[in-house]
Amino acid sequence: MAEVKGVEAVERALQILDCFDPGSPELSLAGIAKKTGQYKSTILRLAVSLEKFGYLIRGENGRFRLGPTTWRLGSNYRQSFDLAGIVRPELKLLAEATNETASFYVREGMSRICLYRSEPTRAIRHSITEGASMPLDRGATGKVLLAFSADMEEGDPSIRSSGFAISRGERDPEVAAVSVPLRSATGRLVGAIAVSGLITRFNEDRCADLVAALVESQKRLTAQISA
């Protein structure tokens, strides 16, 4: 079967949207051009359409930021999992019990997406942006998602055996995390839940306590996810 080619203009528009991230929430025309390698004239033409449909907003200073349509699509993406009402309350309890950031991730290809998170009240904590995409090969949740996915050859068998993963400084040198898989009552892998914080707080004894807390959350959530 012949390969179907994409639409170049659409791909260029998506490259523009993909420039924005938590570290670059607002970009100048020159900044977008540098990130995409596109001509400024091309970016301006595409920006007109992206603004028209709410994907981009151009401020009075001439800089661009993502528009409300991207937020709506992101919300629709999260709601498509139909888990917010179940997972969010449990993450809040987990964050309160551990005084660390609790989060829930799903796998998308070779990335993991943070769908939901709850942060503790303490001043120094690990902050995560909902919707953030991260690699699967670094971090405890990525390793859990790999280990418990349908293709068992991808993951670490020791993680499948223990039922959890611990990472220290793999993606961020100052952050550690502990994660366990979340399955439905029928055994289907739904995602991974995790607790993360400063690496200095995650010694061996502390990690053992966090694993125990995560397993309790895991049990409560699994009982509520039927399919």
Image (spheres, grey):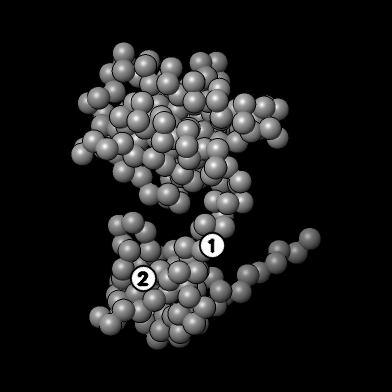
Seen from the viewer's position, the closer of residues 109 and 82 is: 82
- Residue positioned 49% across, 25% down in the render: 217
Residue 14's place in the image compared with 130, above or below, is: below
Looking at the image, can residue 93 be seen? yes
Q: Most extreme residue toward the right, as rendered?
A: 1
Callouts 1 and 2 close, C-beta under 8 Å: no
Q: Which residue is mark 1?
A: 73
The image quadrant where one finds the N terminus is bottom right
Q: CA distance from mark 1 to mark 2?
A: 16 Å
Q: Amino acid at mark 2?
A: Arg
- Residue positioned 62% across, 26% down in the render: 223
Mark identifier at residue 65: 2
Q: Residue 94 location, x and y as percent?
A: 41, 29
Q: Residue 214 location, x and y as percent?
A: 45, 24
Density class for disc 1 (Cα within 10 Å; few <14, some 14-19, many ≥20) is few
Looking at the image, can residue 171 be seen? no
Q: Is residue 17 left or right of residue 122?
A: right
- Residue positioned 49% across, 46% down in the render: 115
Mark identifier at residue 41: none
The local secondary structure at tag 1 comes to helix
Seen from the viewer's position, the closer of residues 156 and 106 is: 106
Density class for disc 2 (Cα within 10 Å; few <14, some 14-19, many ≥20) is many
Q: Earlier in the sequence, mark 1 or mark 2?
A: 2
Q: Residue 25 location, x and y as percent?
A: 32, 64
Q: Is residue 168 left or right of residue 75?
A: left
Seen from the viewer's position, the closer of residues 155 and 23 is: 23
Q: Residue 189 location, x and y as percent?
A: 62, 32
Q: How many marks?
A: 2
Which of label 1 and label 2 is nearer to you? 1
Q: Amino acid at mark 1?
A: Leu
